Each structure stands twice: as C-alpha cells, then as structure tokens.
Image (spheres, coloured by chain):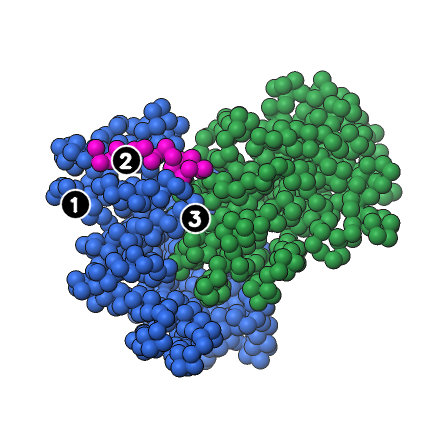
Chain colours: A green, B blue
Amino acid sequence: MKPRSTFVHVICATGLCLASAAATAADTIKVGVLHSLSGTMAISETTLKDTMLMLVEQQNAKGGLLGKELEAVVVDPASDWPLFAEKARELIEVNEVDAVFGAWTSVSRKSVLPVFEELNSLLFYPVQYEGEESSKNVFYTGAAPNQQAIPAVDYLEEEVGVERWILAGTDYVYPRTTNKILEAYLLDKGVAAEDIMINYTPFGHSDWQSIVSDIKKFGSTGKKTAVVSTINGDANVPFYKELGTQGVSAEDIPVIAFSVGEEELSGIDTAPLVGHLAAWNYFMSVETDENDEFIEGWHKFIGTDERVTNDPMEAHYLGFNMWVKAVEKAGTTDPDAVQAAIIGVSVPNLTGGLSSMLPNHHITKPVLIGEIQDDGQFDVVSETDGLVAGDAWSDFLPDSKDIVADWRKPMMCGNYNVKTGKCSGQNL
Amino acid sequence: MRSTDKSSILKLHPNILLGSKAHLTIVLTIFAQLFFLPFNALAQENTDNAVILEIAPKLSDKKTRNSALEQLIASDAPMSREWLIALLDGVLYLRKSDSLPVFAEKKGKSFKIVNASNGNHEGEAGRREVSKIKINNAIRGKLRAAIASISLKDDDVEVRLQAVKTMTRSLNDSDLAAISEYLPEESDKRVQKAMQLALNLADLSDADDQIIIDAVNAIGINTDDTVTQKLRELSTQTEAPEVANAASESLTVIEKRISLYEKIETLFFGLSLGSVLAMAAIGLAITFGVMGVINMAHGEMIMLGAYTTWAIQTVLPAFIEYSLFIAVPAAFLVAFMVGMIIEILVIRHLYGRPLETLLATFGISLILQQTVRTLISPQNVPVSNPAWMSGLWEIDPALSLAINRVVIFFFCLFIFFTLMWLLKYTNFGLKVRAVSQNRQMARALGAKSGSIDALTFGLGAGIAGVAGVALTQLSNVGPNMGQAYIVDSFMVVVFGGVGNLWGTLLAGLSLGVFNKLLEPWAGAVVAKIVVLVFIIMFIQKYPKGLFPQKGRAAGD
C-alpha cells in the first residue's frame, strides 16, 4: 500500500484533498447506494436506487439525522460482480460513507462481503436470499428461507393439498441452497422421493417447451402437484408464457414463485398468470396506513402513479429506518456503535406490524402468500399468524442445524456450533 | 320466464371456458349485450335477482364467501350465470358507497360501471370508489365446474365441448345425469364423443365387473390423462383378474401410443427451438457470413425490432390483432436504418481489422442497450400476443402443438426463402455476392462496393429486427434481450459454415433438435454444455462448418 499512500499524500499536499474532505464531512452524513444502474441487473436494482434516494429525501425533510443533512452517494457497479467490490471500497474509502445500502444477487453480496469486513463498514442487503451466512457487517433485511420458502410450502401442503412437488430453479447458489433446504424439509415431512422433481435451468433460459411438458406429465398422475419456482429474473416471462401456451392453469398446477413480484409482473401480460402464487413479506396491495403513505410518497417521488412497489423496496425501507433509529440511539454513525445499538431496534413495517433486528442480523417479518390478479397485483390468500424470525442457518440442513449466529457480547459470532462450542469465523 | 331478450344475454362468447385469453372478449360481450337490453325485460326480473343481491356482500368477505358461492351456484336467479362468469373474469365489483354489486369495465383510470342486478348504467367510478370481489384458485375451480354444468345446452359447440371436458376431470352424479340427458340431443360429433367418454369413465367405477370390462373396451385407445389414471388404478388395485387384465392390456397399447406422441412432441420442440435459433442467426449470416464483419451488436438489432413491436402496440392499442403485420416491415426499416448508420459511421472505417471491428461493435451494443434503458425503461416492456397466435392446436389429448410456435417456424422459413431469393435472383443480390467474393474485381466491373456494403449490412440488421418481432411472442422484451441470442447466433453461423445461408438454416434446426433430444435426460444446463462441447469438437475437425464454401466463393 506504500505507493498509494504516497500518491494520496501528494494529492493532499496540493490542498485539494483536505479542503473537500473537511467541507463535506462536517455538514452531512453520507449513505452509499450500491445498486447496478446498467447491465443485466439494472432491471431490478434501478428501482432500489430510487427508493434509497426517496428515503434519504424524506428523512431530510424530517430534519435529517443527528442534526445533519443526509447525503446519498450513488455508484454504478454495472452488474459486474468484481466491480461491486471495487465500488464498495470506493464508497467507504473515498466517499467515506457511514453505511451502504445495496447489492441484489448473492454473488454480488459475497463479492463485497470481505470489503465490508476488512474496512468495518455496514451493508444493508434488501433481497431474499439462501441464508447460511451471518456477517458482523451485513444486515439482511430480505427474507431468509424460513421466512419465504418454508411457509410457502406449508401453505401449499395444508391449504391446497399438494402431494407432488416440482422444485424448479435457475442454476446458481440461491435456488440450489433453497431447494436443498426444501427437499430436506419435504422428505422430513414424509413426502416420497419420487414425488419430488428438481429441475435447474441456465440464466435467462428462454425455451421452456420440454420443461413445461415434463411438468405437465409429472402433474398428470392424479395427485395434486405444484411448482415451487426459484427461477430468476428474465427467465420467468418465457416460463409463464409457455405455461399459458400449453394450457397449464393455476387450478391444475399452481406455481409459487419467490422471485416474481409486482415489478417483474409490470413487464408482462398477466392474463395467463392469474391464480399463480408468490410468497413475499410485503405486497403492494396490502391495505394499511403505512403502506398507503409509502406508495403515495413513492408516486410523488418518481413522478408517476403507474410505478409499483415491491418487497425489496420495503426491505430497504425497514433497513434504512432501523439504521436511522440505531444511529439516533448510539448518537454516532460509528460502525461498531451502530452494530451494537441496532440489535433489538424495532420499526413499523408496511404490513401493519413491528419488525425488529435480531442478534443474528436478520429481521422479523410476516410471511404473505398472494395470488396474481389480472392487474399485475397480488391478492393475499394467506398470512402467517405472527412475525417469523429470520434464521441465518437452516435447521433442515445437516451441516447447519447446530449452527447459530449471535452478534451480541459475549458470543459475537456469526457461525457458532452449539454442539462443539466452537466459533468458526464469520462464514463457512 | 326467459324472454327472448334474456336469451340474448345468455349467448356468450364461444370460448367462455377456454381460459383467460378469451375472457376479455367475453366481458366485452356481456357489456355490449347488457347495454342493448330493453329495460322492461330487466324490470321484470328484478325480483328474482334480489336473492343474489344479498349474496354479493358476503362474497367479498373471506369468511362467508364459500357459503355465499354455494348459494349463488344453487340459485336459479336468471342472472346467476352472468354473475358466475363475471366473478371468474374478475369484473364483479362492489361500489364502496352503497355496497351495490356492479360489473365494471376498466376505462383508462376509472371504471365504467353497470348495475349487476338490472343492467342499469351507473356511469363512471374512480379506482378507489369500487372494490373488486376477489377470488382464489379454489373458488375459480368451483366456478368453472359450476359454469360447465349449465353450459351443456349452450348454442356454441366449443363451449359445450369444453364444458364436458371440465366435467370429465371430476365427475359427479349430477353432471353424469346431465350428460346422459343431453347426449341424445347432441348434434356435434366431437361433443358426442366427449360425452360418451365421460359416461364410459363413470362406468369404470361400477361395481359390476362386466360393465367395467365393457367400458374399458368401449374407451379403446384414448390418451386422455383421466383414462390412463383410471386404467392404472384398475390394473393394480382390482381384485377381479379379468378386469385387471383388460385394463392393463388397454393401458399397454395406450402407453405405447403416448410414447410415440412424446417423440413427435420432442421433435416439434426441437424444430421450434431450431427455428428460433436459425431466425436469430440469419441476419448474422449476412453480416458475419457474407461480409465477414464480426458484429457484436447483432443482438441489439433483434432488440430494436422487438421494441418497434412494443412501440406499435403502444401507439395503436386498438389493433393488437394486426400489430405484427405492421411491426414486421416497421422493425425491418428501423433496424435497417440503424444498421446502415452503424456501417457508415463505424464499420466502414474498420474493414480488414476484425479485432477492432469486434471491439467497436461491442461498444455499440452497450451504447444501444443503455440508450434503451435510459430513454424507455430498465424494466421489460409488455408485448401482447394476438389471439390468432395463442392457444394450442390439439391433434390428440396427448399431442398438441402451440400455435405461436408453428407460426414462428413457418415465418422463419419465409424469411429464409425471401432472403435466398433476394440474393440469388435480384440485381442487388448479385452485387452483394460479387463484392463478398472478390471486392477488387467487383469494383473493377463497376459495382459500388461502398454503398453495397452499407446496404448489405443494413439488410442483415433489418432481418435481425424482423426476428425480434417474432421473438416478442416467445420471450421478454427488455434492454438485455439481445445478449441472450448473440452467442447462440454466432454458434449457429459458425457451425453451419460461414457464408452459407443453407448451412445456417440447417445448423439452427439441427442444433435445436439435438438440444431437445438431450434435455430430457441431461437437464437444460448440461444439454447446453454438451451442445457447446460438440460444436467445439466439430469445428476442430471441420473448421469451415457443415457446408464450407467451395471454389472461388471460399475467398482465401
């Protein structure tokens, strides 16, 4: 690091560095926004960037934080995983942000994780993910598998009477891990192995003819069959189109998706999808005062009331409010102080409850199951009784069932084996 | 009770049970007919409809809706069928101010509402003034079954056929009674057959062994799911050996038939995938194959064509059915112009420098993607399928082909042969071939190689744009869509033999079929890898592809 620090000194000697750093650090608290604005993930992440800008604007209208104005620093990691790490470093080191809100895919989170741990900064990650992770520096405000996948399967089994399962996913870490957990869970419940079909497809898969035909065949035995879909992003549209074309209706074989929300539906003709399901922790159609206010604020900010809201947006809303509350509680934006203060912080969620930050850096959330309507919205058909606590390490995988995460003293460990009493670092 | 006016309401759209595609039309039909309904006829029926008026608020409450639905289905009020259909189509609303049930049609940001009990116009209502009576899958199933049992006497053959099919899936005594009642009056052969099958299926559950065996024989070879399920049950669970034998014999024949159909289906899937690959690649076969330009922005030309389709549907929302016919020439023109501009501004200056061309066109592809993202939206945009291109062409219960795929297959052949004709039999085609074979000699003979290059590149781009129109019917339309096709397109062109159009077509089709043959046992991911490995090995052995250029055309 020698050459670089000399370089920094040279720059600073010119007087530029000192002046700019001193001027901004004094009056504003900086919040980093690390979402792709170009490349393949821009489709989902651009909205989250706008959400963060809105939240910062709204907080400033309320008087800022600790008497200071908040300032959002937006960078574009361009859907390029190594660039995520570079941009994260830039945000923390160059822009000196106090917390970062960002990332979407698991691989981008894994790519920035070492940066946040090395530089001891905070990352709020807003997307549902596969679990099996808990870092001191990351707060997971999206759903863990037990807050989405497991309740979804329970709903199908108990309310719809499903006996045969197709676990279909895109071939990468989130679907693979989720399906591993679901398979273990279903076998545990007594579902026969031949009643489970697992299918993976490449990213952006567009030719679903044979797979949908297989699904039809698998579902034609007379036993109620359902598809649990962890199909990601762009591959969903041709998948649902093919289901519609081959006449697979939601009454025959319902598809429950974990990655299809209001935003994804806004790009397609939803007529053939009516009745298919999704499991999330938030739907735009939920009728609460908080949600009405949020939607109104969003439409005002974005300048059109055509735009929808979705689950990861609510996750950012929760994460941002929790961070604000923790900073107020700690009286400083120092990462260690915020990390200690944020555990136990509760903020109202948009579905009419209070979500709180757990010691394992996940949060409590309600789980909602919705059916797709012809207007691209979801109608909630089932809701968990109370809030579900996010579980970092799945209880259904043999490797992780004895592992817990607790970032309070004295344990301070993201990967603690209760059997052996050992802490194996932050992650496996 | 039923006046002639009333029966006109009941004459609904033929495709009532065919699925949601047809629903919009049904809804419109209900509306149109309600509006033209004379009021005296309705006034007379108000009293009967009073029953369902009470049901409406209960339907919107999750706790009472199941019992309310039973009540509605059981009710013989004249409007009950309209209600069931409206409920299924999601057009039954409650006006919030006075809980009046209304049929609502979305009109811009508000709803045009019609009193659901007497057909009176109630004017318009804002989005927040009405609330939809929501239903779930369980209710949808019940509704379909209920509508089916009152559709057996419908005037439309398709409605009756679909009604019988819906009933066959879960037969109950009242349905069977209705079917045997209407069978003698039925005039259409297909409906008769479906009704007979339903009755035979019911006989399979009879207590008398002889009746079962007769029914098995009467059913014969039928590949319907319900038949195979029932026969499978009989062949394993029945105590009487004659019954089990008859069932399993019949089942063996049926399963053989099904597996034959499965093979045909796989072949069709393969050809369909192949036609998509070939179509995406034909444009590239011109720019890369004939001109030798490595055009990384080829996928974005496809994207431009797709966005043109979207733009046309957005500008002309009333002409969705014909939008593709306008979109094909429009997309060709748009992509053609963009292609020409790219050629004149960039590629022209880079001939003979393939690496620089590759980098420059890659840059252009990124610029085009981001332009669309910034100007239109980073989200996908919706493109509707016209009704004539949706649905299935059912050859047999076990074999049905998607109409859009059949159309696209022939469209691919159409593009291909048009292009062949253009290159072979027109003056322009002659010049293109001359320039691509020997630039100096062609120039010496008076061909303006500069303008020909620009036109050829534009042609390749234009054809990619036309392919984009077809792809809107299968896949999403978004800024990234071109990326999905660029690698596959190069693969097809290289495999087929650079510079050979026939090679491109055959390579596309054979790779499609190969892929689909592998998929069932290898999975989609491995199938893709195997295809790539196969191509690498093939190119090692035959570097010039399936159909290498020979003689002077080979150039080097």
Give me the C-alpha separation between circle 2 and circle 1: 20 Å
> Percent x, y for residue A145?
64, 48
Q: Is residue A384 above or below residue A72?
A: below
Q: Is residue B508 left or right of residue A189?
A: left
Type of residue at label 2? Val
Q: Quadrant of the N terminus of chain B?
A: top left
Type of residue at label 3? Asn
> Percent x, y for residue A202?
57, 60
Q: Earlier in the sequence, mark 2 or mark 1?
A: 1
| Residue designated by label 1 | B7
10 Å neighbourhood of mark 2: few (<14), some, or many (≥20)?
some
What predominant SS class does the magenta segment belong to?
helix
Give me the C-alpha separation between circle 2 and circle 3: 25 Å
Front residue (pair A289, A15): A289
Mark drawn on residue B137: 3
Q: Secondary structure at mark 3?
A: helix
The magenta stretch is B47-65
